[in-house]
Image: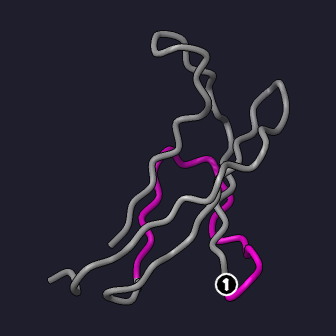
Amino acid sequence: MSQIQPLGPQKNPKEALRADFAYIQLMDISIFCYLYRGYAKRHTFEGLDAWTEYRYRIRFMNEIGNSEWSQQIIVSTTSKFK
């Protein structure tokens, strides 16, 4: 099971910008596909294969506008969760 908690970009540790909406994409073969779009502050990805590398990227939106896409976030799973 993999969990990403989008908090939004930070100016400094005491002053975080609020992310009202998050986009999360997963790389599928050679292109990014939308995996999640929504208002939740936490999202759990289920059904991931064991011993597999996944590449994500995240973008946030608030009253100011959209952020740039993040650098690729590489997550590797281990054995099946029991």
For this rendering, which residue is in front, 24 or 30? 30
**Measuring 46% from the left and 15% from the top, which residue is drawn there?**
13
Query: In this picture, which residue range is highlighted in magenta?
Result: 29-46
**Measuring 77% from the left and 38% from the top, which residue is drawn there?**
67
- Residue 60 image offset from top left, x and y in percent: 70, 42
Q: Residue furthest top?
A: 14
In this rendering, position of residue 39 left or right of residue 2: right
For this rendering, which residue is in front, 80 or 29? 29
Question: Which residue is denoted by mark 1 in the rendering?
Answer: 28
Query: Is-magenta flag for residue 37?
Result: yes
User: Amino acid type of disc 1?
Assistant: Asp
Looking at the rendered image, the quarter that the C terminus falls into is bottom left
- Residue 61 image offset from top left, x and y in percent: 75, 39
Q: Dot 1 surroundings within 10 Å: few (below 14), some, or many (20 or more)? A: few
Q: Is label 1 in a helix, a strand or a loop?
A: strand
Query: Is-magenta flag for residue 30?
Result: yes
Q: Residue furthest right?
A: 65
Looking at the rendered image, the quarter that the N terminus falls into is bottom left
For this rendering, which residue is in front, 57 or 34? 57
Q: Residue furthest left?
A: 82
**Measuring 23% from the left and 86% from the top, which residue is drawn there?**
80
In this rendering, position of residue 20 left or right of residue 4: right
Q: Residue 57 appears in which quarter of the rendering?
A: bottom right
